[in-house]
Amino acid sequence: MRRIYPLTELRNGPLFTMLLSICCIVLFPGVSPAIDLTGTSSTYLQSRTAADDTKFLPLYEYLDFAVQKNAESSFSAHFGGWGRYDLKDESFGKKTDTDLQYGYLSYRKATNNTVVNLGRVMVFEGVASERLDGIYARTDLKGGLGVSAFGGSPVETATDLPGNNMLYGARLSHEFSDIYKIGLSYLKEEKNSEDFRKEEGVDIWLQPMSKVAVIGRSSYNSITSGWMEHSYSLSLGPFDKLRLGADFSRISYRDYFSSATMTAFSFTPDLLSLDEKSRTLGASAAYMVTDKVTVSVDYKKYGYSIAGDAAYFGGKIACSKSDGGGGLSYHRMNGETSRLRYAEYRLYKYIKSGKTDVGVELFEVAYDDAINGVKDAYSGSLTAGYELTEKMKIGADVEYAKNPDFDKDVRAFIKLIYKFGSERETRKGA
């Protein structure tokens, strides 16, 4: 990911007005014959300790919901956001935190795959994987053609990039039956009327026969005049009980991160060079021994122009049943640095009985050479959940870990998930 989402002040601007309108629809539904409200409330309480032994106890609330006039209505409103309050100390430098992830009004037409979203929208179209305050629209045309477009102000990060910014772009696609779909996309971001990002791309889905599928994309940076990324995967099968796969990717860091909008990607020479280029080749195979047991093997070759090469390979046995399952795996990493020479072991088991589910996982990394005095890094986790009602579930996770960075890392996680939905109908003359 090239960007994260920051704190958002909601009390000023059109987004607050839009959200206020949504609340009015929910609280005063009498103006329409029917109002459907569905959504999820997720409450999390986490306990963790930082490297300097500071203890944190953050409480999170994630809320998302959709409001629709009735089941057949083409208009709807969607909201998603979260808030955090630290019960002990301050995580991320603040006692409280909030973020509006998305909030938009939507029009959807029953034909031609037509959608228009207005507000804080998420856009995933070709080279675009963005969040912006503006508009997004798509529709199908004749002859297998499709088009989408978007524009607005990008929601960026706490890097506080200066200037007035504008982001816009489009994607044109063509598909033929169930054989292929190809898209050409364009994205441009301006700051103070100057180009900040300018990217083009091609994405493809191809299935020339029933057991062969290719999916991938290539992205080009017009500002640096270089290819940012190539990423493609091949899927073969199933052939009776066998599935095969292969993948390839190539990333040029200078072209990919030239317009990074996240502080984590503000590279310094002692962390990672922008001159680095990575290449990955992989292959995998999975075989169903029975309808409940699957055995798989995989291999991945990593190549770096500066950091050197590494190979990751191993296998897995997995069992899945209606009342649970489990598995075990072994992988080996052979690289040119101490952190990239190790053996990896994983064992997990989960059980579901009635309204209760329990899971346990053990994970170990055995380094060839000790790192910070630690040769064996390991972790163990226990998860449990109970379905209080059809709409409400409570759960807890506990994890213990030791690694080269932490002598002891203990984390606890309590969660309460509530799914709500209502339909209010007002009959004429009532």
Image (cartoon, rainbow, N blue to C red):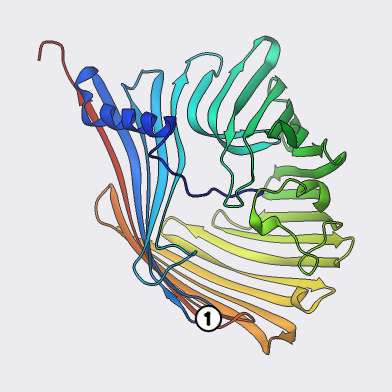
x and y percentages locating residue 133 in the rendered image: 52, 33
Residue at the disc numbered 1: 52
Q: Position of residue 98 (x, y in %)?
A: 42, 51
Viewer-closest of 178 and 413: 413
Residue 24, picture quadrant = top left
Please tell me whether residue 330 is drawn above or below residue 98 in the rendered image.
below
Which of the 4 image quadrants contains residue 315?
bottom right
Closer to us: 354 or 262:
262
Residue appearing at x 70%, y 49% in the figure: 260
Q: Amino acid at mark 1?
A: Asp
Q: Is residue 119 above or below residue 308?
A: above
Q: Is residue 252 visible?
A: no
Q: Residue at x 66, y 58 (%)?
A: 264
Residue nearer the viewer, 50 or 415:
50
Name the foreground residue: 388 vs 411: 411
- Percent x, y of residue 189: 69, 34
Q: How many marks?
A: 1
Left or right, residue 78 beside residue 377: left
Q: Residue furthest bottom?
A: 373
| Residue reaching furthest to the left | 430
What residue sits 46% from the left and 66% below the top?
Answer: 91
How would you rate the neighbour count of disc 1 (Cα within 10 Å): few for under 14, some for 14-19, many for 20 or more?
A: few
Question: Which residue is depicted at the point 47% across and 73% down?
Answer: 381
